[in-house]
Image: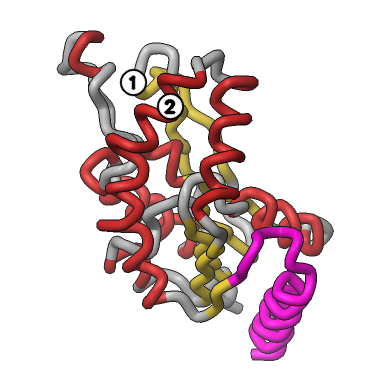
Amino acid sequence: MEKNKPVVIGVAGGSGSGKTSVTRAIYERFKETSILVIEQDAYYKDQSHLPFEERLKTNYDHPLAFDNDLLVEHLQQLLEYKSIEKPIYDYKVHNRSTETIHVEPKEVIIVEGILILEDANLVDLMDIKVFVDTDADLRIIRRLLRDIKDRGRTLDSVIDQYIQVVRPAHMQFIEPSKRYADLIIPEGGENHVAVDIMASKIENILVKNSNL
């Protein structure tokens, strides 16, 4: 008997919005079932053809930075219960690593990223589309803390990047994409009611699929 198609959930939102906390909250609910997370960040384009100085100029908040064709191809393979080799992006060299991560198909697939609702081909593969909507002041504070603590950035460099790149990209590409969301979650993973609603919806789909 042929298996039913896995459930694909898209979790989008601006940098520092709380996408990861929402994704983690959902993952924790279903890890005993069969669930995997695919991060759009892993699918930044290979830049081996560019010298390091040029790679430093990469705008990681622009749709053109992503290899969405490969992401779509991998999701289609997972939907057919085929394994994939997920890329690894190395921020130290601003390029895709030569290594990959072997990923086996699961019943629930969460696709997380700032621009996953901006690409129509990705949206078409999703059963549930979520946008994590958090005020700009909280997002910039979270980004400051993350980049300074985890990525060794200076305060001035993070603020400059936010003003020059992050904020314009958010206004032009990310914010408009929330019109495609089925569910808008304010304040990320701390919104337990919204996470409960998401979990119930996923459970209903899984039960329905198991009865077909």
Q: Is residue 37 left or right of residue 114?
A: right
Q: Is residue 138 left or right of residue 42?
A: right
Q: Quadrant of residue 109?
A: bottom right
- Residue drawn at (47%, 27%) of the image: 100
What's under tag 2, amino acid-wise?
A: Tyr
**Quadrant containing the N terminus in the rendered view:** bottom right
Few, some or many residues within 10 Å of mark 2 (<14, 14–19, 20+): many
Residue of label 2 = 89
Q: Is residue 141 left or right of residue 82?
A: right
Q: What stretch of residues is rendered in magenta?
A: 185-212
Few, some or many residues within 10 Å of mark 1 (<14, 14–19, 20+): many
Total numbered labels? 2
- Residue drawn at (52%, 42%) of the image: 140
Q: Which mark is residue 95?
A: 1
Q: Which mark is residue 47?
A: none
- Residue drawn at (80%, 56%) of the image: 28
In the rendered image, residue 192, in percent from the top left (x then y), is placed at 79, 69
In the rendered image, residue 113, in percent from the top left (x then y), is placed at 46, 51
Q: Is residue 18 above or below residue 6?
A: above
What's under tag 1, amino acid-wise?
A: Asn
Majority secondary structure of the magenta segment?
helix
Q: Estimate the spatial distance between the alpha carbons at disc 2 and disc 1, rounded to whole Å.
A: 6 Å
Please tell me whether mark 1 sits on a helix, a strand or a loop.
strand
- Residue drawn at (27%, 33%) of the image: 59
Q: Is residue 19 magenta?
A: no
